[in-house]
Structure formats: structure tokens, C-alpha cells
Image: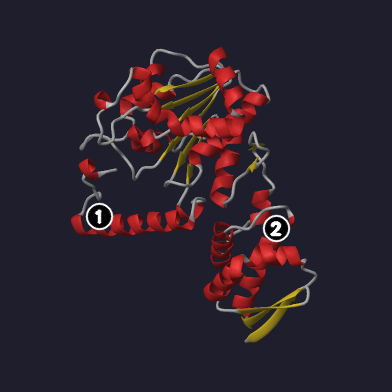
Amino acid sequence: MHVLRTIDNVAAESMKNIFGGLDSNLKKIERSLQVEVTVRNDSIRIEGEEGRVSRAAEVLKSLLELSERGNSITEQNVDYAIALSMENASGSLSEIDRDVVCHTVSGKPVKPKTLGQKKYVDAMREKMIVFGVGPAGTGKTYLAIAMAVQAFKNNEVDRIILTRPAIEAGEKLGYLPGDLQSKIDPYLRPLYDALFQIMGSESFQHNMEKGTIEVAPLAYMRGRTLDNAYIILDEAQNTTPSQMKMFLTRIGFNSKCIVTGDRTQKDLPSGTESGLDLALRILRKINEIGIIELTNRDVVRHPLVQKIVEAYEQYESTHKNSTGGRARYDRSNRK
């Protein structure tokens, strides 16, 4: 049945924000949901089949609420709103947007942008140990660091400890210039970048000097007991089972531990089992441990990143089915 629905009393600025440059967002909504959208004064008119019109109205209302909350509507917002409408998922962009984790040093709010990210943030609030697993661009590390900084500012913990396995990915550590710290710093740079953005360089340096923030390779965790700390293990897919067990058994009283990783981007030697994969199998039934699996739907970088992730997933699925095993790549050709 062909129907017409209108959304009335829409401010001109909100329309401009929602529709995008040259109405690119509006054209995407029309093309994806097969509806026709026109504007008459302060009203948005949607025409088409009843079910499609309802979805389009839901998408536009969701984006309108997001705009009225002061957000600049991005292509990722539009893509995700369309995806939610097609999946009939519970929850909306405006509900997700209300959850502000903290603010960056420049005053920009840090908040989840997808339902998967919202579940991840909620799990970090509720559980002592949380595994955040998913592809690149899903905000696993950034949101974990934001939660750690907020807990530190609220005096919920005395220190923040960030760690990564310093595993070689095609290039040998020994060939990098400088001392040991200089060789290790490139592996930890993403953690530094996130801390700089959220805390500011001065606050970060001050707390590093005091020892209340520590960024170190995973090997430095051995033999320690970490009380009153917010601990983040990044790139956990590159741990061995013994390293993962060592890390998880460092956790002391009043501590919180977040483990992040992308199971499709392992740099371990061929035939070595990932400590992350094994931990997920062993620990899944422990109630105090949260396991959040993010997908390409939760990618919040440039939309092209989501397409790249989807293309690789399709390739790996096809290759696995045709060979009867896990898809592998030539590690020597990685850049």
C-alpha cells in the first residue's frame, strides 16, 4: 500500500544537518529504503510502501533527535540508523547518545555510538573483567581508556595500567633505532594517543611521572599483584595462552580489567594458539566476566573501514569453506 507520512515542525538547521552536503544523506536514505522524501516548509514528507515509509520515518526521527542534542550527523550515523531500522533492533541512536562516558581535554563528549558499544560500556561498568573483541575501528581500546580515565578521576582506582604484547609484526625489534624504550614505544603509541586526547599531554605526563599511569609491555606484568587499578590489555590476540593466564592472575582487590583484541589480526608465529581465543573458550561461563563481541556494524571510523572489514570477512569465510581451515595470510607481506 502506497502511503504518505509527514514529520512536522523541523527546524531548517536540523534539516541541513540531517540531509548532509548536497543532500547526500537524504539520497542514501531514499536509495536504501526505496522511498521518496521531499520537504515542504518545515515538514518532511515521506512517500512509498507502508513498511518502507515507517522505517524511513524512524530513521529520520532518530537522526533528528541526534541533531537536536547538538551532534553533527555523520555518514556513519546515517548508515547505522538505516541498519537498525532494517534489523528492527531495540534501542535508538538518541538513547545511545545519552550515555556520556567522559569528556576529552577539548571538551568533546566520549560516548558509545552503536548498540554494541553501549553493551560494551555497560559491561565495563558492571563486571570486574571484560573482554572486548571485534574488528578494527569498533572503539574497543578508546572506550576502555575513556572508562579508565573516568574511574581514575572519580577516585574509584588509584592508577591506570595499560599494556600490550610487544610482538613483532613483520619487522624485527632489533633493527629499530634507539634503546629498549625507544623500540617498544611504537607498539604502545595508540595507547599514548588515546590518553593524550582524553587527559591532555600535561596531565598525562604528570601522572606518568607520579607512577599513577603506567604504559608498559605485557612482559613487565609478570610477578606483580595489581590492586586498586584499572588495567587494560590491548591487542590481546597476540598473547600466548601462558601470557594470558599470567596477566589475568595479576588482578588484585578493587581492580578492573579490560582485555581487547581482534581475533582476525594475529601476528603470532604459525601454529601458536592465541591466548585470547583460549581464554574466551575457558572463561565464557564465569558470570563475573563479561564478553562483548563487536562486529562490523560497530565500526565507527570512516565508512570505508566498515566495507574493508566486511570484504575481509567474506574472503575469510569463503577461503575457510574452500580449504576446510582458517584463512591465513603471508605475514611477510604485511605493511
Which residue ends up furthest to the bottom in the rendered image?
Answer: 1
Circle 2 SS class: helix
The answer to whether 142 appears left or right of 175 in the picture is: right
Circle 1 SS class: helix
The residue under the point 57% across, 69% down is 24
Looking at the rendered structure, the kind of residue marked 2 is Ser
The answer to whether 283 appears left or right of 150 in the picture is: left
> Which quadrant of the figure has residue 187?
top left
Pinpoint residue 104: horizontal percent, then vertical percent. Answer: 63, 36
Mark 1, other Cα within 10 Å: few <14 / some 14–19 / many ≥20: some
Q: Earlier in the sequence, mark 2 or mark 1?
A: 2
The answer to whether 57 appears left or right of 257 in the picture is: right
Residue in the foreground of this view, choosing between 51 and 60? 60
Which residue ends up furthest to the front in the rendered image?
Answer: 177
Name the residue carrying label 1. 320
The answer to whether 333 appears left or right of 239 in the picture is: left
Name the residue carrying label 2. 67
Pinpoint residue 60: horizontal percent, then vertical percent. Answer: 66, 67
Residue in the foreground of this view, choosing between 86 and 56? 56
Residue in the foreground of this view, choosing between 110 and 248? 110
The residue under the point 25% across, 50% down is 327
Pinpoint residue 130: horizontal percent, then vertical percent. Answer: 50, 35
The residue under the point 40% across, 37% down is 280
User: Does 225 appear above or below 33?
Assistant: above
User: Does 100 appear above or below 93?
Assistant: above
Looking at the rendered structure, the kind of residue marked 1 is Lys
The residue under the point 60% across, 18% down is 158
Q: CA distance from mark 2 to mark 1?
A: 43 Å
> Which quadrant of the figure has residue 263?
top left
> Which quadrant of the figure has residue 224?
top left
